[in-house]
Amino acid sequence: MKLQRRSHQHGFSLIELIVVIAIIFVLLAIAIPNAMNVRRNTLEAIVMREIQTIHQAQVQYMSQFGKYAGGLEELGPPKSGSEGPRAANLIPASLASGEKDGYLFTLKETPEGYVINANPKVFGSTGRRTFYLDQNGVIHHNWGPEPATTNSPEIGK
């Protein structure tokens, strides 16, 4: 009596592997753009919070020194010496530098008070919107590369 050997096939065929890889690529093609949008939305929420931080620092600066700060460095920590109107230590140095989270922040005095702008360092890559806030405390935004102004739509409208 002869024993017949059966060969058992182990593993996956080439077709099965190709199908699995194709499914993975389809899932990635769907997930990556959604993840990028979530990342951009999160970054823009952080930037709006930073603008509000500057606004709150301006209110505090006004109560301490009787005027608004003329630039971000006046709200930041002192490079040396003690705190005062030139460096009130009301915002972190990272924000006082004017560049944070892929955005460029500016603070300018105006006859009415001040204007804060936050614009992406590289529009479309580090951000999709520009932001504006003045002494009234209302954030405006623009979906184009042009800086937002008081005439731009308000956030939430």
Image (spheres, rainbow, N blue to C red):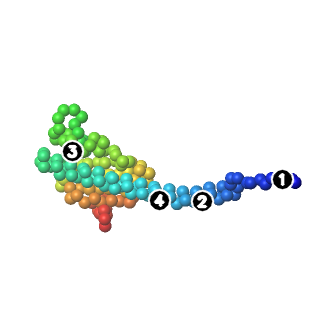
Left or right: 81 in relation to 128: left
Q: Quadrant of residue 95?
A: top left
Residue type at numbered disc 2: Ile
In contact (CB < 8 Å): disc 4 and disc 2? no
> Which quarter of the rendered picture does the C terminus lie within?
bottom left
Kind of residue indicated by mark 4:
Asn
The amino acid marked with disc number 3 is Leu
Residue hosting label 2: 23
Q: Secondary structure at mark 4?
A: helix
Mark earlier in primary sequence (3, 4): 4
> Which is in the foreground here, disc 3 or disc 1?
1
Question: How far is disc 4 from disc 2 in space, using C-alphas?
Answer: 17 Å
Q: Nearer the viewer, mark 4 or mark 2?
A: 2
Query: Do the residues bearing badges 1 and 4 touch, measured as CB atoms within 8 Å?
Result: no
Residue occupied by mark 1: 3
Q: Which mark is in front, 3 or 2?
A: 2
Taking the spot 35% from the left edge, 51% from the top edge, the residue there is 119
User: Mark 4 highlights which residue?
Assistant: 34
Q: In the figure, 32 relative to 121: above or below?
A: below
Callout 4 crowding tier (Cα within 10 Å): few <14, some 14–19, many ≥20: few
For marks 3 and 2, the one nearer the N-term is 2
